[in-house]
Image (cartoon, rainbow, N blue to C red):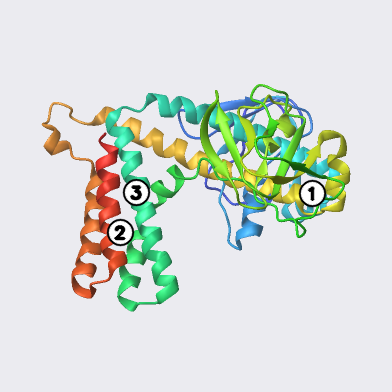
Amino acid sequence: MGGQDIYIYLRNGETDIAYMLKKGSITVELNAHDSFEIEDDNFIFGTPEILLSESDGFNHFRNFSVKAHPDTDYVRIPAKTVFQMISSYKVGFAMAKAIAEILVNVNTILTKKKNEVGEKERLTQEYCKIFAWAADAVATHYQKKRFPWLEPICNNARASLTYAKGSAFSSFDQKTKFEIASTEVDEFSKVFPPGATICNQGDMGDELYILKAGKLKVLIDDTPIAEIEDPGSVIGEMALLLGQVRNATIKAVEEAILTVVKKSNLKDFATANPDFLKTISTDLSRRVTHNCAVVNDLDEIIESSKMEDNSLPSALRENKYKEELKDLKDSIKKLYEKYDMEWLYDLVSDITEKMLDVRK
């Protein structure tokens, strides 16, 4: 399929075919300003949206456009064949590795974009994240209590662009989850006593871990940044798939039971757990989708800020996302004044506190 550049598929296009790059190279275009190249024989692409469509029960459109260079050969893989192939260890591993490689490239662009944004753009991100958090809090109470007066504010907030942006901005660090029924020690399990080091920052990643029980601490440059205690949390899959070094140190806070999957026994583990590679691939696909959305949102913010009249007083250049957040807070406050429920008061107070923290 050589001779000229040709788009294999376009961003926001239909999702029913995956592809395998047999020879040559492709360009992945997230938007008009951000792209990266891939040159890797037998590289499988176009699978993230297919996996997510099957997982979520609705169609996911393409996250980006893909363009083939001259003298590039590729083959088409129908969606139904993707699910047949992923059950094979060799192909399943290749799919997961390819999605991980795309994620690394997207994250490189994302980091660059985040470094480009100025103070106003940073505030936009934070206000959108608070908006999404508040909307989800309202939705959670509506789902539990089914108060009819919560439904309009819940639906309106979640239908807004501000909510979509906030959800995307908040989705950087989602962890893969793979539930293992038993918490007992088996051939893949290992018990770590309190204070034990599971892996060190800078080490080569030749194994991944699944938390079965206990609590872990994540440190970067000896500084604690997070704790992991949800059973089923998968740690280190990117390092294992791509042969990367560890970007953090993991230690046991209390006695922890971990499933330890080494590259040497990954095939045995995947055979014993047929959905494992599909789960990994689907979750990596979700991260690709979220982070592509954030890249494109940041690109819009950066480009629109270039067109603003910065000679206007700041009061006339107020952040519209802040205004939408204030409107949401005022709507919740009115509900509190009408129904006098403590959780509504607490939610208004939390929104106010978070908005003040943004300015610090």
The quadrant of the image that shows the C terminus is top left
Q: Position of residue 311 (x, y in %)?
A: 13, 26
Q: Position of residue 309 (x, y in %)?
A: 18, 29
| Residue picked out by circle 2 | 347
| Residue picked out by circle 1 | 86
Q: Nearer the viewer, mark 2 or mark 1?
A: 2
C-alpha separation, residue under disc 2 versus residue under disc 3:
11 Å
Disc 2 secondary structure class: helix
Front residue of 86/4: it is 86
| Residue picked out by circle 3 | 130
Q: Position of residue 283 (x, y in %)?
A: 64, 47
Q: Residue at x 60, y 45 (%)?
A: 175
Q: Nearer the viewer, mark 2 or mark 3?
A: 2
Q: Residue at x 35, y 56 (%)?
A: 134
> To which quarter of the image does residue 188 belong?
top right
The quadrant of the image that shows the N terminus is top right
Can residue 141 be spotted in the picture? Answer: yes
Q: Amino acid at mark 1?
A: Ile
> To which quarter of the image does residue 113 belong?
top left
Q: Are marks 2 and 3 in contact (CB under 8 Å)?
A: no
Front residue of 347/212: it is 212
- 10 Å neighbourhood of mark 3: few (<14), some, or many (≥20)? many
- 10 Å neighbourhood of mark 1: few (<14), some, or many (≥20)? many
Front residue of 171/195: it is 195
Q: Amino acid at mark 2?
A: Leu
C-alpha separation, residue under disc 2 versus residue under disc 1:
44 Å
**Counting residues from the N terminus, which is met first, the one under dot 2 or under dot 1?**
1
Disc 3 secondary structure class: helix
